[in-house]
Structure formats: C-alpha cells, structure tokens
Image (tube, rainbow, N blue to C red):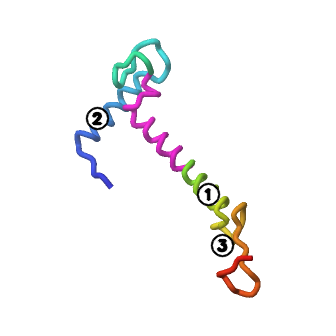
Amino acid sequence: MQRYTVTQYLTAINSLIDGLRQLEMDGFCCTICGSDDHFAFECGHNPLVAMTLCEQMARRSSQLHDILHHLSGYNKRFGATTGPAKVKLPRDGNHDDPT
C-alpha cells in the first residue's frame, strides 16, 4: 500500500474545501480545477469522486466475482457445483471419465 505525503494530504483537503464552495451547479468553472466543462461534484480531482468510483468498482467486482463463480459451476456459499458449467462426476468414482 502506498504511503501518502503531507503534500498529497493537503492537496486532497484543499480540493475538498474548494469543492465545498460549489455544492450546486452555479454556472461558474469548477472550483477545484478551474475547468469550464464540469463542476466540483464531478471533478476528477475531487477525492469524493475517486472514493465513490472505488466503492462502485469494489461492489461491482464482487458481483462479477459471484457471477463468474456461478457460470464456472461453483457456488462458494454452499461449496457445491451449480450453474451452467456444473460438473457431474461419474457415480463409480472414476474422475478421469466424466461420461
């Protein structure tokens, strides 16, 4: 995990403070970076935007992980083979011949 510097923390804090000055669309440039094509609440330099994106990615990757387990034929919650790729082992215990 990367350790952040005092400068990086201060930059993030200042970005948050700048963002507080533009909680609504006010027709002016972004108070964080000065761009005229977005506002502070959607600025890529806004730490809250980064945090929200990370939370969404984590949630979606967890969902994708569960879907892939289902599609691959394994259900981690029950420790059983399920789903479209369910593997059926032969009754005689011979795992080399799945027919």
Left or right? Give the position of 15 relative to 62. left
In the displayed structure, would residue 1 be above or below residue 97? Answer: above
Local SS, label 1: helix
| Residue type at the position of mark 3 | Gly
Check residue 82 in the rendering and tell me which mark sits there, or answer none: none
Image location (x, y in percent) of residue 61: 54, 51
Judge the density around disc 2: few (<14), some (14-19), many (≥20) Cα neighbours within 10 Å.
Answer: some
Residue ID for mark 1: 68
Where is residue 39 drawn, in percent x and y?
Answer: 44, 21
Q: Quadrant of residue 16?
A: top left
Q: Give the farthest residue toward the right.
A: 91
List x then y, in percent, for residue 51: 45, 41
Q: Is residue 29 magenta?
A: no
Residue 33, image x, y percentages: 34, 24
Frontmost of labels 1 and 3 is: 1
- Is-magenta flag for residue 40? yes
Q: Which residue bears the numbered disc 3?
A: 79
- What whole-number distance in Å separates the C-alpha atoms at marks 1 and 3? 15 Å
